[in-house]
């Protein structure tokens, strides 16, 4: 909403300094987006007096004027206007002026004669369309006064953002009322009224029918005849322009002016263009038919949908898109004589949909969307008629056709000042509440038990309850004046739950392991699973977005891996070769049985490249399966999850992983995730040319299986005996099997088994075989073992593992 | 030459050899040569029996003196040599301390998670719970229960991602992108669930991802992170809202920052306000960063609308409450003057490593 201060000042007292007004508006809840000084374009433009005017020596149509502009010396100005003459008071653009249209005025020579400025026409000053000649001022015009000041066009326009709950502030009267409450000042608003009515009654000329009462709650039609279409008077054009609309002609400008004044959008139909049935016109408000079309004022043909409101003249074809824009066929033009004026109230929801669906926003639609005060349609129509009479030379037909089936009523609210004070937390006097609510247009009277009875004005649909009035009191009192206090909650404690704490711990552990956290979109590209090479077994059906912005965000992710792989690709594409990332987030798993999907949390990571490039102390080492597995190990260890083990990932189930370098992670029998090298074919489809090892774990399973504590194991007091043992076994014998067999063969004295070397050599170890070397620690917690005892146990152990593992033992 | 002269010669020679011994081995050789089993002094002590009884005590005394002196000289020299050896090792082990240290591999936390955890800590300290809810919500929880009018623009497919309802396959609805299911556009639905589930007092925040159909650009992301809070109790006032948010603002932005409450409008609260924090760059004087105003808009808040309480089964005559919401990405952008929010979503190691 653009508010002209010159206009506002006619209605309410405002501070001289616009900054003070702006500060008060902001303080009370009206956001100010910009402050413009209108009339700035007329800097260096002054009033002048032509003392002499002679023919130009070298050009027939030019004159050379001597112009007094109040300076020491008169100026010499070359002028081509036909109406220029000595003795005229004119408007002069001096050197340095920049006129509308970016016309810069410089000292120049015209056909050999120096011109030190320009005598201006209305159009050159941006004041109107008249370009027939220069603007001639009355004889009493002063000389050498800034033109903006003399013409009264110096103005400041405040551009305000009006929140959707305040349709009243989309009008000058409403805005003035708000300002009057902000400053606790009275308003003095003068509204135009019709001076003379004559001719047939409007009801004899027009029928109005509302066929769709859900779309239109009131329709008032007035008729004025004999308008003389022409430019608006300067004051009218200026106000309309200050409000942000181009001045068009007096009829159109009047409807716009009254809309800005009252907030009630109006529409003027050319009565002569409406269908004539025995000298009578019809107005019908009905719902649009799916697919019907209308060409709106802007020349665009619009295809309508059911639920939009249209106006017809009783015929088949709409003549206006109700509340949004008029039709081209009934437009006011140069030839318009009689006008049918519409002042109506259309349903906000319908207008809002229409405006959005057609991508057509107008000053009118904006106001109807927010809500127009139906109780004032008739009064507003009268004001417009009065201005047609005053500014367009129209004759106003008596009466109006007014269809208003269910009049709106003022809301009556009981306000308990004590409750308001308690709710806001400030000792606001009851008097303050009563006074300021009255300033806002409420009727306030004393009720029972110290309450106030408040009748709320119908242009404030946001005021219907005590809480609504408390808000008004709060903002007018000033939020900054309310003392800040911190509540003390009784019977309540807060803090993170154990699971929330653990979820954060998971992040800390992974960071300590060297991974950096990233956040990806929860969106997925259709086909991400196929790209990965993953079946959707166990992943439900995708959650599909009905109105996606882009194809790569058409559904919700079911695995974290594609997002992380894209991050790897992004880094590689940007020259970053070492990528070590983790993410904690949700996947969304839909099902045909439930409307809402499951949203389990996952923790996933990717490792590619090395921890670091070569340094002075270490060569770069490519990250591999065991780096990722080590991180998973560390994570489950820190969470104190028991019985975690790794099973080779079957290619059937884990198609996106490299067989032989990937594993399913289990805790007992429960699958809790996987870890492994991503299949090179999958990597290729994500544009990645170097190995990536990844893991994805079910965060909920981790949280369920985590323990706060596990039993403490006492630290051994007695020394153990360490023996090294190398087993040469077939390649298909796993480490896990070796450890199991060693453990059972070693009996209770075998305390620790540590793998310290794996060695392969076809000649020395044998084809298809590997040597695994272990440190074995024997210990009895109660006594020191003798060498003989250990030897005996070792003999037995070696015999057993030779048998159970088919191992050759090297001591 | 008498024995006493021999002792003198032994002593002098030993002293001289100890003094010139340049290693522990050379020193030990001196010890063996003098004090060893076949050492010169030992030999004299062994030959004591051949001396006259008058000489014996004198020579014995003298021999012991010589032995003590030699032993002391050897010990002294040994310390000297050990010190020298230590000094040599120390200088040999000196390093260029300006060379880079061996870097441990420690990852970093994402900027947004840092901010969320920081805010959680502030509110946990004030006795708040942290609660999250589903991303896929119903229109009831995302809009209706929050007092959003049925025709509110925020419900349009331009402002909300709608999601297909697999239990309600209806091609026509899909064409119009109409569904009762959506990706939550705010975390307020979590608060409605909390109000339905529990009786006041309720003190909670709901941090989490939210979704809106804004094409990703420097200032927008279609998925971002909101932290919304709700307090419902007997006797909560607008002053309590201010006190809580003032504390929060200073905890997050710094002790010396001022706040400003501007009345605003949100369907969920009444009265509603936008909160500005004084600009950290210019201290409120006005600069390019705050567009000359001295203030930066950071959050929206207000007293919970009685309709919202009622819809969730809470008696607005008995209880009152306040709510607020802040965007983590906005805080991140303000703190670091980030030129482009998309950096937060790219997973660029060079970006992540900075925080």
Image (cartoon, helix red, strand yellow):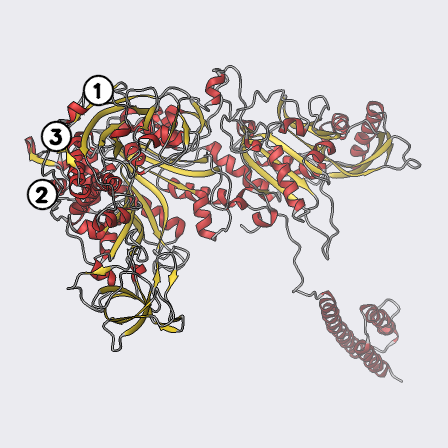
Q: Secondary structure at mark 1?
A: loop
Q: Chain of mark 2?
A: A
Task: Tell me residue A604's x, y (percent).
Answer: 60, 34
Circles 3, 2 touching at the beta carbon (< 8 Å): no
Which of the marked residues, 1 or 2, is nearer the chain's N terminus? 1
**Toward the viewer: A629 or A410?**
A410
Q: Which mark is residue A114?
A: none
How far apart are the two marked residues, 3 and 2, measured between alpha carbons?
51 Å
Q: Quadrant of the N terminus of chain A?
A: top left
User: Dividing the picture into quarters, in which one does residue A640 lie?
Assistant: top right
User: Dividing the picture into quarters, in which one does residue A217 lie?
Assistant: top left
Residue pointed to by mark 3: A199
Image mark count: 3
How far apart are the two marked residues, 1 and 3, measured between alpha carbons?
17 Å
Q: Residue furthest front?
A: A60
Q: Chain of mark 1?
A: A
At x 48%, y 16%, the residue is B170
Q: Chain of mark 3?
A: A
Above or below, comparing residue B115 to residue A349 in the picture: below
At x 25%, y 20%, the residue is A213
**Toward the viewer: A575 or A755?**
A575
Same-chain status of marks 1 and 3: yes
Mark 1 vs mark 2, foreground winner is 1
Residue pointed to by mark 1: A278
The reply, left or right, for residue A697 in relation to residue A482 is right
Circles 1, 3 touching at the beta carbon (< 8 Å): no
How far apart are the two marked residues, 1 and 2, measured between alpha carbons?
61 Å
Q: Secondary structure at mark 3?
A: loop
Q: Quadrant of the C terminus of chain A?
A: top right
**Toward the viewer: A493 or A738?**
A493
Residue pointed to by mark 2: A431
| Whether residue A711 can be seen here | no
């Amino acid at each position: 909403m653009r508010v002209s201060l010159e206009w506002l000042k006619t209605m309410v007292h405002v501070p001289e300094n616009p900054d003070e007004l702006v500060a008060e508006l902001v303080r009370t809840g009206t956001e100010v987006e910009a402050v413009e000084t209108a009339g700035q374009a007329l800097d260096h433009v002054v009033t002048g007096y032509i003392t002499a005017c002679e023919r130009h020596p070298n050009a027939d149509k030019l004159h050379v004027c001597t112009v007094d502009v109040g300076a020491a010396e008169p100026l010499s100005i070359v002028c081509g206007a036909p109406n220029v003459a000595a003795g005229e008071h004119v408007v002069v653009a001096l050197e340095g002026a920049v006129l509308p249209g970016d016309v810069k005025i410089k000292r120049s020579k015209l056909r050999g004669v120096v011109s030190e400025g320009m005598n201006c026409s209305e159009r050159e000053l941006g004041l109107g369309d008249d370009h027939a000649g220069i603007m001639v001022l009355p004889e009493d015009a002063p000389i050498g006064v800034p033109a903006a000041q003399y013409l009264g066009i110096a103005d400041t326009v405040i551009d305000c953002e009006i929140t959707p709950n305040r349709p009243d502030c989309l009008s000058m009267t409403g805005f003035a009322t708000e300002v009057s409450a902000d400053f606790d000042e009275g308003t003095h608003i003068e509204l135009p009224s019709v001076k003379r009515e004559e001719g047939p009654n409007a009801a004899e000329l027009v029928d109005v029918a509302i066929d769709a009462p859900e779309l239109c709650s009131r329709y008032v039609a007035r008729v004025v005849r004999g308008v003389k279409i022409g430019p608006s008077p300067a004051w009218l054009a200026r106000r309309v322009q200050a409000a942000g609309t181009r001045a068009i002609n007096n009829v159109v400008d009047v409807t716009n002016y009254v809309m800005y004044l009252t907030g009630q959008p109006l529409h003027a139909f050319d009565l002569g263009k409406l269908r004539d049935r025995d000298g009578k016109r019809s107005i019908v408000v009905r719902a649009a038919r799916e697919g019907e079309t209308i060409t709106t004022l802007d020349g665009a043909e619009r295809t309508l949908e059911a639920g939009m409101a249209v106006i017809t003249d009783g015929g088949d074809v709409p003549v206006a898109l109700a509340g949004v824009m008029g039709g081209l066929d009934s437009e006011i033009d140069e030839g318009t004589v009689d006008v049918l004026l519409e002042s109506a109230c259309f349903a906000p929801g319908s207008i809002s949909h229409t405006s959005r669906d057609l991508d057509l926003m107008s000053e009118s639609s904006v106001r109807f969307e927010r809500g127009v005060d139906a109780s004032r349609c008739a009064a507003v129509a009268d004001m417009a008629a009065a201005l047609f009479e005053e500014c367009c030379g129209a004759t106003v037909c008596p009466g109006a056709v007014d269809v208003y089936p269910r009049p709106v009523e003022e809301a009556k609210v009981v306000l308990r000042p004590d409750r308001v004070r308690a709710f806001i937390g400030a000792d606001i006097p009851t008097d303050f509440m009563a006074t300021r609510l009255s300033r806002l247009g409420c009727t306030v009277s004393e009720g029972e038990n110290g309450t106030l009875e408040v009748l709320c004005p119908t242009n404030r649909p946001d005021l219907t309850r005590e809480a609504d009035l408390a808000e008004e009191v709060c903002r007018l009192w000033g939020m900054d004046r309310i003392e800040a206090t911190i509540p003390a909650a009784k019977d309540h404690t807060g803090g993170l739950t154990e699971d929330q704490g653990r979820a954060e711990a998971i992040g800390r552990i992974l960071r300590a392991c060297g991974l950096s956290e990233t956040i990806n979109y929860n969106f997925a590209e259709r086909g991400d699973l196929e790209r990965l090479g993953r079946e959707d077994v166990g992943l439900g059906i995708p959650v599909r977005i009905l109105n996606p912005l882009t194809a790569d965000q058409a559904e919700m992710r079911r695995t974290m891996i594609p997002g992380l792989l894209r991050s790897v690709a992004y880094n590689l594409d940007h020259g970053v070769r070492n990528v070590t990332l983790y993410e904690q987030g949700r996947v969304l798993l839909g099902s045909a049985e439930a409307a809402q999907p499951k949203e389990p949390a996952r923790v996933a990571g990717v490792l590619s490249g090395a921890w670091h490039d070569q340094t002075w102390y270490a060569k770069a080492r490519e990250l591999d399966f065991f780096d990722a597995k080590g991180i998973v190990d560390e994570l489950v260890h820190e969470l104190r999850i028991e019985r975690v083990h790794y099973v080779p990932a079957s290619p059937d189930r884990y198609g996106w992983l490299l067989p032989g370098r990937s594993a399913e992670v289990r805790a007992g029998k429960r699958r809790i995730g996987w870890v492994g090298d991503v299949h090179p074919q999958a990597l290729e489809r994500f544009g990645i040319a170097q190995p990536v090892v990844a893991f994805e774990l079910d965060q909920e399973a981790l949280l369920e299986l985590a323990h706060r504590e596990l039993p403490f194991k006492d630290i051994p007091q007695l020394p153990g005996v360490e023996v090294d043992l190398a087993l040469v076994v077939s390649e298909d014998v796993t480490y896990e099997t070796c450890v199991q067999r060693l453990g059972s063969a070693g009996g209770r004295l075998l305390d620790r088994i540590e793998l310290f070397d794996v060695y392969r050599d076809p000649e020395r170890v044998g084809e298809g075989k590997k040597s695994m070397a272990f440190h074995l620690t024997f210990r009895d917690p109660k006594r020191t073992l003798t060498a003989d005892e250990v030897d005996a146990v070792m003999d037995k152990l070696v015999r057993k593992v030779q048998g159970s593992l088919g191992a050759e033992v090297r001591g | 030459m008498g024995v006493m002269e021999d002792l003198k010669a032994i002593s002098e020679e030993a002293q001289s050899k100890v003094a010139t011994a340049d290693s522990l081995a050379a020193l030990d050789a001196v010890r063996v040569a003098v004090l060893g089993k076949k050492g010169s002094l030992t030999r004299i002590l062994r030959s004591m029996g051949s001396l006259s009884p008058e000489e014996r005590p004198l020579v014995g005394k003298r021999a012991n003196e010589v032995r003590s002196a030699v032993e002391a000289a050897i010990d002294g020299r040994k310390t000297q040599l050990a010190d020298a050896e230590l000094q040599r090792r120390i200088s040999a082990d000196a390093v260029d301390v300006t060379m880079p240290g061996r870097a441990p591999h420690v990852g970093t936390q994402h900027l947004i998670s840092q901010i969320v955890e920081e805010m959680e800590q502030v509110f946990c300290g004030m006795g708040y719970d942290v609660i999250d809810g589903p991303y896929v919500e119903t229109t009831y929880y995302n809009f209706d229960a929050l007092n959003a009018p049925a025709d509110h623009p925020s419900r349009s497919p331009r402002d909300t991602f709608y999601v297909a309802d697999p239990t309600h396959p209806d091609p026509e609805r899909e064409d119009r992108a109409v569904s009762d299911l959506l990706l939550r556009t705010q975390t307020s639905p979590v608060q409605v669930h909390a109000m339905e589930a529990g009786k006041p007092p309720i003190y909670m925040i709901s941090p989490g991802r939210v979704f809106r159909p804004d094409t990703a650009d420097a200032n927008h992301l279609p998925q971002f992170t909101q932290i919304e809070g709700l307090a419902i109790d007997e006797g909560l006032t607008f002053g309590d809202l201010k006190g809580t948010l003032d504390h929060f603002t200073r905890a997050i932005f710094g002790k010396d920052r001022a706040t400003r409450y501007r009345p605003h409008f949100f369907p969920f609260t009444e009265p509603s306000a936008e909160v500005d924090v004084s600009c950290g760059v210019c201290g409120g004087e006005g600069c390019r960063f705050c567009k000359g105003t001295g203030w930066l808009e950071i959050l929206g808040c207000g007293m919970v609308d009685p309709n919202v309480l009622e819809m969730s089964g809470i008696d607005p005559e008995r209880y009152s409450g306040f709510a607020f919401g802040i965007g983590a990405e906005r805080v991140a952008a303000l703190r670091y003057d980030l030129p482009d929010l998309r950096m937060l979503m790219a997973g660029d190691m060079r970006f992540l490593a900075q925080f």
